[in-house]
Image (cartoon, rainbow, N blue to C red):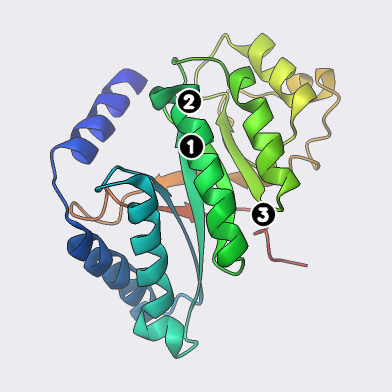
Amino acid sequence: PIQKCVKFVLFATTIIPFPLPILFQVAVSVVEEFALDGVVYLELRTTLRPVPTCRDYLHTVIQSLTSAPSVLNELIVVRLLVSIDRARGVEEAQKAVALAIEAAHSNPDLVVGVDLSGNPNVGSLLDYVPMLNEARAHGLKTTVHLAEVPDQSSEWLAFLRSHVPDRLGHVTFLTQRDTTNAGTDTDAARKIVLAAKTPLGRYVLPFFEVHVFVLKTYFSA
């Protein structure tokens, strides 16, 4: 089943061409839709795409999220996570983290973290520890999707010994025993996203995903 989901996401994110002006309009419309629904805090994540470059893509997203009317009128607070797609490999992940750090320095109130997700059967979580630690060293929060498939406990445990994310995604197969064995208090991994992938409609899916919080956000007391 998870392979079907991965194929669908890849299909949806590759067949739809979108020049930067369209990306800008989509991002603004996403914010405005949520504001109309009465949402006062919105966190989005997006995977960088070479349109025409990843830096251009991220710059356009930032421009759109900071210029949305509801943001300017202080009706909604928007935050952005830069997503790291495991399927793209470590080299692309390093580029994404570097751009996220760069963007966070110039837009600290908007770009607040990085999110490691994607096909759990590609590569190892351990490959991403150095860049996650680097992101954290620059003040970014980290979200990691793990335990999405069974029989990978040894990898999760080794990863959690090297990097405890600020928030966990999915953790479908992560048990109390796993966190105890890793020396990680479940409260330390304290922010859990149960619905980390919520499509925003058929035209919005390729651009953004909403993070639905169960316990706390990064900004709660």
Look at label 1 and name its amino acid.
Lys
Q: Left or right of 165: which side holds 10?
A: left
Is residue 139 visible in the rendered structure shown here?
Answer: yes
Look at label 2 and name its amino acid.
Glu
Q: Left or right of 169: which side holds 164?
A: right
How far apart are the alpha carbons under marks 3 and 2? 33 Å
How far apart are the alpha carbons under marks 1 and 2? 7 Å
Helix, strand or loop at label 1? It is helix
- Quadrant assignment, res 111: bottom right
Q: Do the residues labelled 1 and 2 touch (CB within 8 Å)?
A: yes
Looking at the rendered image, the quarter that the C terminus falls into is bottom right
Which residue is under mark 2?
91
Residue 212 in the image: x percent, y percent?
Answer: 50, 54
Disc number at residue 133? none
Which residue is under mark 3?
215
The residue sitting at the bottom extreme is 73
Residue 204 in the image: x percent, y percent?
Answer: 25, 55
Residue 159 in the image: x percent, y percent?
Answer: 70, 21
Neighbour tally class for label 1: few under 14, some 14-19, many 20 plus, Cα within 10 Å = some
